[in-house]
Amino acid sequence: MTKTFVSADDVAKRAGVSRSAVSRTFTPGASVSDETRQRVMEAAETLGYHVNQLARGLMRSETGIVCLVVSEMDTPYRSKLVRALTHELQKAGKISMLLNADRSDGSVDAALRQTLHYRADASILLSGLPDKAITKLCLDSGQRIVLINRDDDIDGPLRINIDDKQAARVAVSAFLRAGCRRLALANSDVGTPSLMARERGFVAAAADYGLDVMVVRHGNTIYESGRHIAQSLFARLDPPDAVFCVNDLMAFGLMDGARHDCGLRIPEDVCVIGFDNIEQSAWASYELTTFSQPVDAIVENSVAWLRPGNDSESIRTIELHAPIVWRKSIARKVS
Amino acid sequence: MTKTFVSADDVAKRAGVSRSAVSRTFTPGASVSDETRQRVMEAAETLGYHVNQLARGLMRSETGIVCLVVSEMDTPYRSKLVRALTHELQKAGKISMLLNADRSDGSVDAALRQTLHYRADASILLSGLPDKAITKLCLDSGQRIVLINRDDDIDGPLRINIDDKQAARVAVSAFLRAGCRRLALANSDVGTPSLMARERGFVAAAADYGLDVMVVRHGNTIYESGRHIAQSLFARLDPPDAVFCVNDLMAFGLMDGARHDCGLRIPEDVCVIGFDNIEQSAWASYELTTFSQPVDAIVENSVAWLRPGNDSESIRTIELHAPIVWRKSIARKVS
DNA sequence: AGAAGTTTTGCACACGCTTGCAAAACAGCG
DNA sequence: CGCTGTTTTGCAAGCGTGTGCAAAACTTCT
């Protein structure tokens, strides 16, 4: 347990130069002669020197730290997003702190506090909704905030949303073209803005065609809820012939429920559409028609917003399109 | 863009005390009277003060930062582990930095360098294998290192491994009891120590019973590879009646391939066992018998190792048991 | 009240870095 | 060689915190 980090002073001594020279060597664009840079680099290499970013962050206004606030990150869609975000952030020279906001109770706020403790340059929220006071505190501290799929009305953060309404409309028309008439919607009890937007959009679009929708909400936005909903939906005397699930996980549960619990065939007896287009949608057991989350665009926009020199005043909300991906969970009814 | 963080000085001025008093208020166990603590807390609250952990890390030897190095983190098993780790680390007062080691080429080394840049207290490696020189550098800097399922022979890190050999042996005996005799093993080309241990363990255990194993390796350790392997295995004149897949994702691919591409039934025509026990194993479409990764134990041991005051000299390797989880992908052959 | 013992408090230095500023070194030129 | 203009370099002052040390304040006891 020596716990001996090598400092710029050590390197300076070894290279026979001043500490400033070392600092400048590792500061892009600073004025150092090729010769000293060479010697510094050499000394740094043999000593194993690494700039202390904590100390650097103390002087500069940027720390290079970006916080990702996310709950239930082992969900396929979330983990995909987190992977893509960290990857892109690293490419942009940033480093990501992962803040788990799992315990529901005020945990997003606690996470944002950590964000302040570590003087993060920015925070990206994938889950939950922060308290306005804390959000304001972060913004006042010069932090940038990105809200992904959280439909907040606070001014200051960048909001990236999916056009859920539009997607829901496409879902309805897809069902109708396939000859379905008894529409159902499977949602969770969670009530996230985007989930509710999908539900409302679907119901409204159906209403435009004069159709009612059986809306069922249950539990969390997970597989088991979908399966549970299948059992209650297909026990009805007027069971649906088409179900729009607010995400893929619920869709898989619903499909498995329909097939294995209720003895139904998909798409012959019932058509299903999901949302997110996670890996599993393409698996042969599901072949789920679903809407593709524009992960790349989300990431790209988030990272671009963090780059200095973009006028933070101009854009505040970005709405992205989620295109439908056709697979085999929907097909024309033979009448 | 004010970028104005409030410092301990501001709080001190507001509360009418010295800056030391503020510092001590936020240092557990320091000597402050109840009255001043009260006043400091109040001032801090109204001003929105948050201790600068970067500066604190400069003085103390601990930064509270733990780095998680992981590639392909959207894999179900990995994301589950990352979620559990961050959760437990947060409970222990640590914060996790997520380092994406996706680009294969030396990216683990680059990640470990970041680890040094931010003076992390510890690093936990879930993927890849680091260069020995860099590992040594980290250790020399007083960092603790945990290698999960990387069977490295460097001395210094804590190594947490699964008893793959034992699991493989259980798999063989399960197949034999079910009446299977033509065993196969589906592996990827990746060649991770743990994957190879499963393969070798399975082949060796089968040999003990005088049985040969058809070993097939293909691509990455993912769904598609499993499906591909199914097609090649079941095209043989002596197709297997039991397949052990080195992870669940490959098992799902293999099952879907067997069922949807080759028209086989599971478990009637072929029995399957996987590894990891991820969410999807319990889904009705798969009902996969598999080995459960002891995620909680892995996390618990990792975090315990980071706690100060455990004698870092004593334990170096922990081998954990992965119990089998019985589901329906294996059943007695009717002979 | 005064002595002795216990908290509490403020000062000042250290941590490892960046950066403005002025001195030093260098290059170009007559 | 001296003059001017351009790099390069070292000094020193910060950045926001923790902490040893001695002075100050408070307690307790005779």
Image (cartoon, coloured by chain):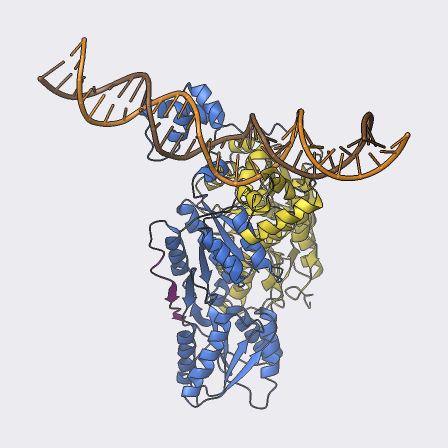
Chain colours: A blue, B yellow, C brown, D orange
User: In the displayed structure, does residue A311 sit left or right of residue B267?
Assistant: left
The C terminus of chain A sits in image quarter: bottom left
Placement of A221 over or under A79, stated as above or below? below
B37 or A72, nearer to the observer: B37
Point out the stretch of residues depicted in magenta: A311-329
The N terminus of chain A sits in image quarter: top right
- Could you tell me residue B308's position as x and y percent? 68, 38
Please report the residue visible at 51 percent of the width from the left and 47 percent of the height from the top.
B6
Residue A31, quarter of picture? top left
User: In the displayed structure, does residue B192 sit left or right of residue A61?
Assistant: right
Placement of A263 over or under B265, stated as above or below? below
Number of numbered callouts drawn? 0
Q: Is residue B215 visible?
A: no
B130 or A108, nearer to the observer: A108
- Could you tell me residue B227's position as x and y percent? 50, 61
Residue A319, quarter of picture? bottom left
Please report the residue visible at 50 percent of the width from the left and 58 percent of the height from the top.
A135
